Image: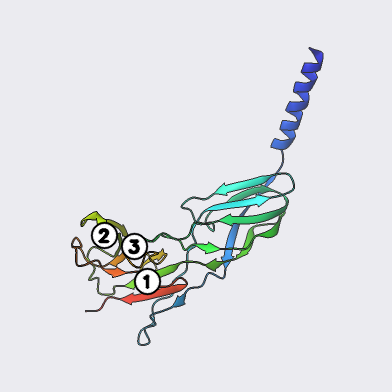
Amino acid sequence: MKKAGILILVILTLWSCEEEVQKVSFRIETNGFILTEAFVDKEEAFPSFPHRVSGGIVKFTNSHKTYEFRTGNTSIEDFEFHLPEGTYLLTFEIPQASLYGQEGGSFIADPGYVNINALTKTIQLRVKANCSMFLVKDDLNQLEKGVYMIERHSYAYGHFWSYPLHTDTLSGLYYTYFTPDTVPSDPSAFLWFYGERPDIEEGGLTTKDFEIGYQYNISILE
């Protein structure tokens, strides 16, 4: 009975020591997320647009443990991480952007070692974009119902699903990050500008001819 009491005391002591380990709070800042402008309007430049990166799974691994953070729909730049001091191998699992658009741009990043100490506030991360982007400018507010990406399959008999583009409050631009259609022989992803339901013959602007790594600037004219 006495031995059991000592064992419990040791376990509680170790647990208490683990709980007392101070953790450092920090954020990740990305560099290198670049998309080449494909449709350059030489007469009128688009407003500057600050890119946003997407979320996913971020792992910090040391010699004892792997700390896994699932940021979900929150950008990794907006997520606050908490770790004990130490040196970690940093790896990422970031899903590639949806065919039908999303708020943050997907990317790839090489694994690398980082040191976390009491002075750490941010970690600089070199990334490479692996998606495309639509930027839509509607200065005259002609798009009463905004802009959408739509999902429409040839076998769906006219049924479709719509995904509104996001609005940048500073520039007023509509935007979405996407992966170009992966089935060019039977595309299902389209950029859609109209308020009416798409019929069999119309489907908006298919993304099958677009390429990863490009930013497509589109102006709505009179």
For the residue labelled by badge 3, is the local secondary structure a helix, a strand or a loop? Answer: loop
Q: Position of residue 140 (x, y in %)?
A: 25, 74
Quarter of the image holding residue 26? Answer: bottom right
Crowd class of label 1 (few under 14; some 14 to 19; many from 20; radius 10 Å): many
Say left or right for 141 vs 120.
Answer: left
* Residue drawn at point x = 28 percent, y = 58 percent: 153
The amino acid pointed to by label 2 is: Ser
Q: Which residue is mark 1?
A: 135
The amino acid pointed to by label 3 is: Leu
The amino acid pointed to by label 1 is: Leu
- Residue 165 has which mark? 3
Crowd class of label 2 (few under 14; some 14 to 19; many from 20; radius 10 Å): few
Q: CA distance from mark 3 to mark 1?
A: 9 Å
* Residue drawn at point x = 51 percent, y = 72 percent: 34
For the residue labelled by badge 2, is the local secondary structure a helix, a strand or a loop? Answer: helix
Tell which tag, 3 or 2, sits nearer the viewer: 2
Question: From this viewpoint, is residue 171 visible?
Answer: no
Q: Position of residue 161 (x, y in %)?
A: 28, 55
Q: Which residue is mark 2?
A: 154
